[in-house]
Image (cartoon, rainbow, N blue to C red):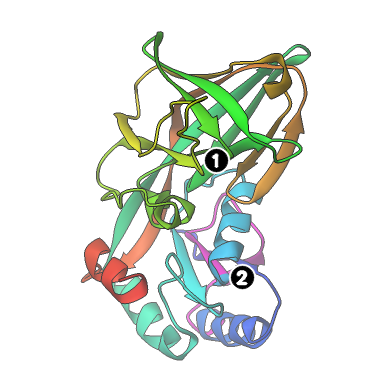
C-alpha cells in the first residue's frame, strides 16, 4: 500500500467543504491526496451525487481501484457515505472492515458506414431516433430474429441499472449478483399496423445480441449511455457484448442490495 488517495469531486454545494475535511483527515494518517485518478492510489473517493459517480468512472476510463462514494447529492444509490459519517468510513477503511461489490459493464458497438464506435455503460444505454420520432429496430438473439421493437426506442440495462430508467419504464429490478442484460421498450406501439415487444426481455450477458434498423429512416440513431449522448448516421447495427473490466465499489460490511432498494425506491 502506497497510502495514496485519489479524490474526484463535483465541486458543488457542500462538496468542496467535504473534500477539505476528508483531505485533512487522511493527511493526518499519513496519506497523500491526489485530485483526479492516480493509478497507484489505494482507493478513489468520489464526492457528489450519483451523477458525479458516473462522471468519475467514465472520465477515469473505468478504473480498477476500489471506489467509495461520499454522498453530497440526492438519491445516493452508489454514494454510500453521508458527509457526517466520514470518520466512521475512514475507521472501517483503515481496519479493513468493508467489502467490495463488483459491478459488471456492458459494451455497445455501433457499426456505421464510416466505422465502428464502442461505448461501455454501467447503468444503461438508451437507443432512439435522432429526431425522437418512432423507431423500428429488429432484435436478434444468437443471430435469430426475435422481434421488431416498434416505439419510441429501447433501453438496454445492466442489473446495476435495472433500478434506474428501466425501472421507471416498468422493467424488472435485477439483483446485481446476476450477469444479465435487460431490453425494455420505450412507449411500444401495439395496434392494427404494428405488433411489438410490450415487456422486458432478460438475457444472459454473454448472449449474442444485435439491434438492426428495420427501415432506412431508422438508421439515424441517438445513443445515450449513462447520460452521455452520441448521434450516428447510417447505422447498420448495434452489437451488445460483455466488457472485460468491472467497477469495484466499496460497501459497508452490512450492505445489502435489497435493503438499499427498499430504502431508496420502494
User: Toward the viewer: 57 or 172?
Assistant: 172
Residue at 45% across / 91% down in the picture? 84
SS at mark 2 in the image: strand
In the image, residue 204 sits, relative to residue 76, either above or below, namely above
Residue 206: x and y in percent read: 34, 23
Which mark, residue 125?
A: 1
Q: Quadrant of residue 136?
A: top right
Q: Is residue 231 rendered to the left or right of residue 223?
A: right
User: How far is mark 2 from mark 1, CA to CA?
Assistant: 34 Å
Q: Is residue 194 rendered to the left or right of residue 100?
A: right
In the image, residue 157 sits, relative to residue 2, either above or below, namely above
Magenta stretch: includes residue 245: no
Residue 138: x and y in percent read: 50, 18
Q: Is residue 48 rendered to the left or right of residue 168?
A: right
Residue 72: x and y in percent read: 55, 80
Residue 259: x and y in percent read: 23, 70
Which mark, residue 33?
A: 2
Who comes first in sequence, dot 2 or dot 1?
Answer: 2
Where does the N terminus fall, quadrant-wise? bottom left
Q: Which residues are magenta?
A: 27-46
Where does the C terminus fall, quadrant-wise? bottom left
Amino acid at each position: 500500500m502506497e497510502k495514496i488517495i485519489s479524490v474526484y469531486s463535483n465541486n458543488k454545494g457542500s462538496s468542496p467543504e467535504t473534500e477539505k475535511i476528508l483531505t485533512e483527515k487522511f493527511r493526518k494518517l499519513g496519506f497523500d491526496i491526489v485530485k483526479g485518478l492516480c493509478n497507484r492510489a489505494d482507493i478513489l473517493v468520489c464526492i457528489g451525487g450519483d451523477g458525479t459517480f458516473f462522471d468519475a468512472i467514465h472520465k477515469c476510463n473505468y478504473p480498477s481501484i476500489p471506489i467509495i462514494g461520499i454522498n453530497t447529492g440526492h438519491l445516493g444509490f452508489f454514494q454510500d457515505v453521508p458527509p457526517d459519517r466520514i470518520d466512521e468510513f475512514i475507521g472501517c477503511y483503515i481496519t479493513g472492515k468493508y467489502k467490495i461489490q463488483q459491478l459488471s459493464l456492458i459494451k455497445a458497438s455501433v457499426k456505421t458506414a464510416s466505422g465502428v464506435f464502442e461505448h461501455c455503460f454501467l447503468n444503461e444505454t438508451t437507443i432512439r431516433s435522432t429526431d425522437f420520432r418512432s423507431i423500428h429496430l429488429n432484435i436478434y438473439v444468437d443471430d435469430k430474429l426475435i422481434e421488431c421493437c416498434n416505439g419510441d426506442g429501447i433501453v438496454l440495462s445492466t442489473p446495476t441499472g435495472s433500478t434506474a430508467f428501466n425501472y421507471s419504464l416498468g422493467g424488472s429490478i435485477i439483483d446485481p449478483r446476476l450477469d444479465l442484460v435487460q431490453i425494455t421498450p420505450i412507449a411500444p406501439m401495439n395496434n392494427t399496423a404494428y405488433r411489438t415487444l410490450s415487456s422486458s426481455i432478460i438475457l444472459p450477458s454473454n448472449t449474442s445480441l444485435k439491434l438492426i434498423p428495420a427501415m432506412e429512416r431508422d438508421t439515424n440513431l441517438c445513443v445515450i449511455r449513462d447520460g452521455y449522448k452520441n448521434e450516428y448516421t447510417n447505422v447498420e447495427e448495434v452489437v451488445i457484448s460483455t466488457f472485460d473490466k468491472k467497477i469495484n465499489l466499496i460497501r459497508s460490511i452490512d450492505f445489502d442490495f435489497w435493503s438499499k432498494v427498499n430504502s431508496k425506491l420502494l
